[in-house]
Image (cartoon, helix red, strand yellow):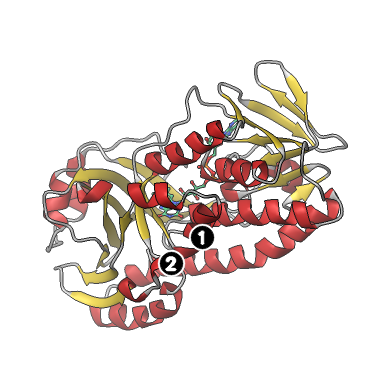
Amino acid sequence: MELTGRDITIIGAGIGGLTAALALRARGAEVRILEQADAIREVGAGIQVSPNGLRVIEALGLGEGFRAISVVGRAVSLREARGREVLRLDLTRLPAEQSYRFVHRADLVDLLAGQARAAGIRVRLLQKVREVMPGTPPRVALCNGDATGAELVIGADGLHSVLRPVLNGKADPFFTGQVAWRAVVPNTVGHPPEARVHMGPGRHMVSYPLRGGDQVNVVAVEERRGWVEESWSHQDAGDNLRAAFAGFGGMVPGLLAGADQPGLWGLFRHPVARVWHGAGVVLLGDAAHPTLPFLAQGANMAMEDAWVLADALSEAPDMASALACYQHRRRDRVVRVIEAANGNAWKYHLRNPLVRGVAHLGLGVVGRLAPG
Ligand code: FAD
């Protein structure tokens, strides 16, 4: 299908929406993004970009810019609570063009948004979408009363997507019994350029350096009985996080000493959407498949989706077959990745250290994809 001049609206200027916009614009489409926020910004935290995500970034022509803002990961190191290493995945053996990298989300979003502006993509802020109506053409209703149409509407609107329930009905996520703190702390401990997973009974913590190694990203997960809301807006006292990991050694106490007011949220498991597309509409990224952060693949999968969607649209003879082809190429892979992420949590939290070490021998396989 010729994409030049096609009128495409994307809901959401997150990593998925911006990547899709760039991939479609590069093929000549006229792209507009509707973003509910008053600025394109990301909450301060890191993400791990594995070789699959890096390939998309490179294909967008952003490889050099991305290398400048990211840290190359040399290893993934799984450690006992006291600090002893139990398994090491050596990432230096990856070919140079496939490096595994750590980046501040805000820096990645800035890179994508800067390129979007340069490419003439119109990003309209303070445009909260209320409803999407599939059709020929599809329609979008905004909370401010405006309405707009396009040839294709892409729902890249994240976890609480307005398009997903239109195609799939209401989802029924369930609380996994785990909560996660997230913080970016100064690197006062000399954290090396590797991802460390510090594992203990019923809890684990992931740390890796950001921004030339000046900062460290920390995500700490603890099993809990109950939680109410799936949101990032909760802040917790640093002392609660430190108390939860009081028995941990190695770099953990030093890292957590710098964690003031970490974010805290409950981890919910969502089914992968069964239907990803309808007449003139399609889902992408977390809107189609929210994932737990135990394989560090949510943003990487969103970038893969974006690239494959643009590819399917330009290759297929018409819109309907392009969207069907996109779902066909993506859904099974995403399901497999999410199942692997779901499986990691229990391995990290096993109570017997010996069994924990053995369980992770299987990580070598998963590790080829993206450990985290
Ligand atoms: P989002 O980033 O959620 O973007 C959605 C956008 O849509 C937002 O800008 C939002 O404001 C906008 N929006 C929403 N609703 C509307 C509306 N109605 N109208 C207009 N705009 C709207 N992934 C990795 O690959 N590697 C990692 O290391 C990693 N670590 C993670 C650590 C944590 C703690 C968490 C929580 C996630 C992590 N992820 C990681 C997952 C990753 O962050 C997400 O999968 C990814 O950001 C999804 O991108 P997205 O563009 O689909 O959605």
Circle 1: residue type = Arg
Is 167 displayed left or right of 222 in the figure?
right
* Foreground pick, 349 / 261: 261
Point 27% across, 71% down: residue: 78
On the question of residue 231 being in view, the answer is no
Residue 191, by quadrant, is bottom left
Point 86% across, 55% down: residue: 317
* Mark 2 closeness class: few <14, some 14–19, many ≥20 residues within 10 Å: some
Q: What element carries label 2?
A: helix
Is 277 displayed left or right of 365 in the figure?
right
Where's the C terminus, which quadrant?
Answer: bottom left
Q: Name the residue under label 2.
A: 98
Mark 2 within 8 Å of ligand 1, using the beta carbon: no
**Can you give x and y, in whole percent of width and height, for residue 131 in the image?**
71, 30
Circle 2: residue type = Gln
Point 34% across, 47% down: residue: 69
Q: Mark 1 points at which residue?
A: 55
Give the alpha-carbon distance from disc 2 to disc 1, as whole Å.
8 Å
* Foreground pick, 153 / 29: 29
On the question of residue 84 being in view, the answer is yes
Q: Is mark 1 on a helix, strand or loop?
A: helix
Point 19% across, 67% down: residue: 81
